[in-house]
Image (tube, helix red, strand yellow):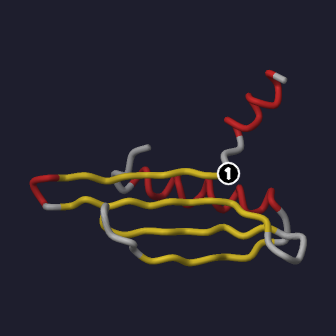
């Protein structure tokens, strides 16, 4: 059972990032989640906006869960470079 837990940490299916800079009145969130779709593939659901507000949402279809997780990791890396933190 421990191996399964380690693999889940290596390939995250959900990630919530925040960027807070009180001096610039910046309170942002960015949520990434991989969810199964009705056609046997997977979707990467992205939500972003100001903390405390509903924000916006975009869903990207991918052929399988592995491709969706790769897209999640790429986007997370880009957001971490821009100052977002987990």
Q: Residue furthest top?
A: 2
- The answer to whether 36 appears left or right of 27 in the picture is right
Residue displayed at 73% across by 38% down: 8
Percent from the top left, x then y, of residue 19? Answer: 31, 53
User: Quick one: SS at disc 1?
Assistant: loop
Please give the count of numbered marks on the rendered protein. Answer: 1
Q: Residue furthest right?
A: 40
- The answer to whether 74 appears left or right of 54 in the picture is right
Query: Which one is nearer the viewer's eye here, 80 or 47?
Result: 47
- The answer to whether 57 appears left or right of 36 in the picture is left
Q: Few, some or many C-alpha atoms within 10 Å of disc 1 (few <14, some 14-19, many ≥20)? A: some
Please identify the quadrant where the N terminus is shown: top right
Which residue bears the numbered disc 1?
A: 13
Residue displayed at 82% across by 25% down: 3
When asked about the image quadrant of residue 29, the answer is: bottom left
Residue displayed at 31% across by 61% down: 51
Residue displayed at 88% across by 77% down: 39
When asked about the image quadrant of residue 49, the answer is: bottom left
Percent from the top left, x then y, of residue 32? Answer: 56, 60
Percent from the top left, x then y, of residue 4? Answer: 81, 31
Query: Which one is nearer the viewer's eye here, 10 or 8?
Result: 8
Residue 51 versus residue 43 in the image, above or below: above
Please identify the quadrant where the C terminus is shown: top left
Residue 11 versus residue 82 in the image, above or below: above
């Amino acid at each position: 059972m421990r191996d399964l837990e380690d693999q889940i940490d290596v390939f995250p299916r959900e990630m919530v990032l925040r960027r807070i800079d009180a001096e610039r009145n910046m309170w942002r969130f960015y949520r990434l989640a991989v969810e199964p779709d009705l056609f046997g593939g997977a979707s990467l659901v992205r939500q972003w906006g100001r903390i405390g507000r509903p924000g916006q949402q975009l869903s990207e279809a991918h052929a399988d869960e592995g491709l969706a997780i790769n897209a999640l990791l790429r986007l997370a890396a880009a957001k971490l470079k821009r100052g977002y933190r987990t």
